[in-house]
C-alpha cells in the first residue's frame, strides 16, 4: 500500500473512531426505559421490560416551571438535569440569583444549546490551546436568545444584573453529559493536587494555592 493511501486510511479510521467515542451509543431497539432500581451496572441504565412500559415513562410533570433552590449555592445558580436513557439527550433548567453564575465548566460528552427564558445572561466559551489559541467567544443573551457551547469546551454563564433573577433552559446531546467544574477539579480534588505544581502553573506563590485549596477542601461543590 502506498504511503499516502495508508496515511489517508489511518486518518479516516481515527476520525470515525473519535466520532464514535464522542457521542452516546445508538439504540438497537425502540424503547430503553431506564430501570433505575436494577443492581446491574452498564453504560447508562438497564432497560425495563418493554411490555411494562407506558406513556407515563415518557412524561415529566411540569416542574421545569418551578424555581430551583439557589440558597445553598456559593456561586448563585442551581441546575436540574434529567436525562433520557439511550436517547442521547438531556434537558436542564438553570436558575441564577442576582449576580449569580454557572462557573466555568465543561461537558466532556455533549454539545449544549442554552435558551434564556427570563432576564439576561453574559455567556461565553473558550477554544482549545491550538484552535484559535484559547479564543473567547462571548455574548450577552436576552429573553428568547440562544447560544451554543461546543462539546468539551470550557464555558460559563453569568447574571450581571444585581437585582433580578434569570432562568434558562439548556438541552444537551447526551443522556449523561457530565460536568467538570474547573475550579472544583483544580483546587478541590481529593487528594489535592500538589501545591507546588499549581503554583508553577498559575504563576503565583504556593501560599496563594494553599489558601485557594482550603476554600474547596470541605465542600468542593461551588
Image: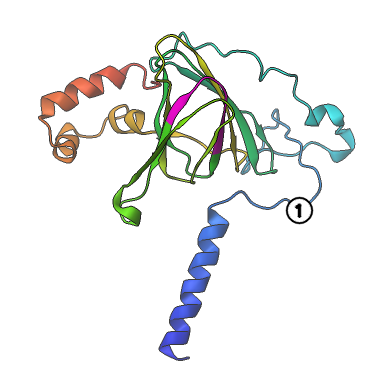
Instruction: Describe the element under mark 1 as helix, strand or loop.
Output: loop
Q: Is residue 189 visible?
A: no
Where 30 sits versus 143, above or below? Answer: below
Give whichever of 41, 150 is nearer the camera. 150
Colour mapping: rainbow
Instruction: State the image quarter where residue 181 is shown.
Output: top left
Q: Position of residue 49 (x, y in %)?
A: 83, 38
- Whether residue 218 sits left or right of residue 44 in the image: it is left
Residue 178 image position (x, y, % from top left):
51, 36
Q: Position of residue 61 (x, y in %)?
A: 75, 19
Quadrant location, the C terminus: top left
Q: Please tell me how crowded label 1 is: few (under 14), some (14-19), or many (20+) other residues with Cα within 10 Å.
A: few
Q: Residue at position x 33%, y 16% from top?
A: 218
Q: Residue at x 40, y 21 (%)?
A: 221
Q: Which residues are magenta?
A: 113-122
Image: 54 above or below 11: above
- Reply yes or no: does residue 55 show up in magenta: no
- Locate residue 169, reporting x and y percent: 59, 28
Tell me how many marks there are.
Answer: 1
Residue at (37% x, 17% y) in the render: 219
Q: Splitting the image into 4 quarters, where does residue 58 fall?
A: top right
Question: Disc 1 marks which residue?
Answer: 28
Per the picture, the main secondary structure of the magenta-coloured stretch is strand
Amino acid at each position: 500500500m502506498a504511503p499516502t493511501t495508508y496515511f489517508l486510511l489511518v486518518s479516516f479510521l481515527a476520525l470515525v473512531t473519535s466520532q464514535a467515542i464522542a457521542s452516546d451509543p445508538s439504540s438497537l431497539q425502540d424503547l430503553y426505559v431506564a430501570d433505575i432500581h436494577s443492581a446491574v451496572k452498564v453504560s447508562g441504565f438497564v432497560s425495563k421490560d418493554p411490555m411494562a412500559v407506558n406513556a407515563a415513562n415518557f412524561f415529566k410533570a411540569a416542574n421545569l416551571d418551578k424555581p430551583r433552590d439557589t440558597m445553598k449555592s456559593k456561586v448563585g445558580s442551581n441546575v436540574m438535569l434529567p436525562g433520557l436513557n439511550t436517547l442521547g439527550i438531556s434537558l436542564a433548567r438553570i436558575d441564577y440569583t442576582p449576580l449569580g453564575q454557572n462557573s466555568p465548566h465543561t461537558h466532556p460528552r455533549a454539545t449544549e444549546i442554552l435558551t434564556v427564558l427570563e432576564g439576561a445572561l453574559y455567556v461565553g466559551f473558550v477554544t482549545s490551546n491550538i484552535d484559535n489559541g484559547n479564543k473567547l467567544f462571548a455574548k450577552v443573551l436576552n429573553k428568547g436568545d440562544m447560544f451554543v457551547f461546543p462539546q468539551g469546551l470550557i464555558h460559563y454563564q453569568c447574571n450581571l444584573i444585581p437585582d433580578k433573577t434569570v432562568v434558562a433552559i439548556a438541552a444537551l446531546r447526551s443522556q449523561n453529559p457530565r460536568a467538570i467544574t474547573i475550579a472544583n477539579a483544580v483546587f478541590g480534588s481529593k487528594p489535592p493536587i500538589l501545591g507546588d505544581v499549581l503554583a508553577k502553573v498559575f504563576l503565583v506563590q504556593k501560599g496563594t494555592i494553599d489558601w485557594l485549596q482550603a476554600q474547596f477542601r470541605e465542600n468542593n461543590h461551588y
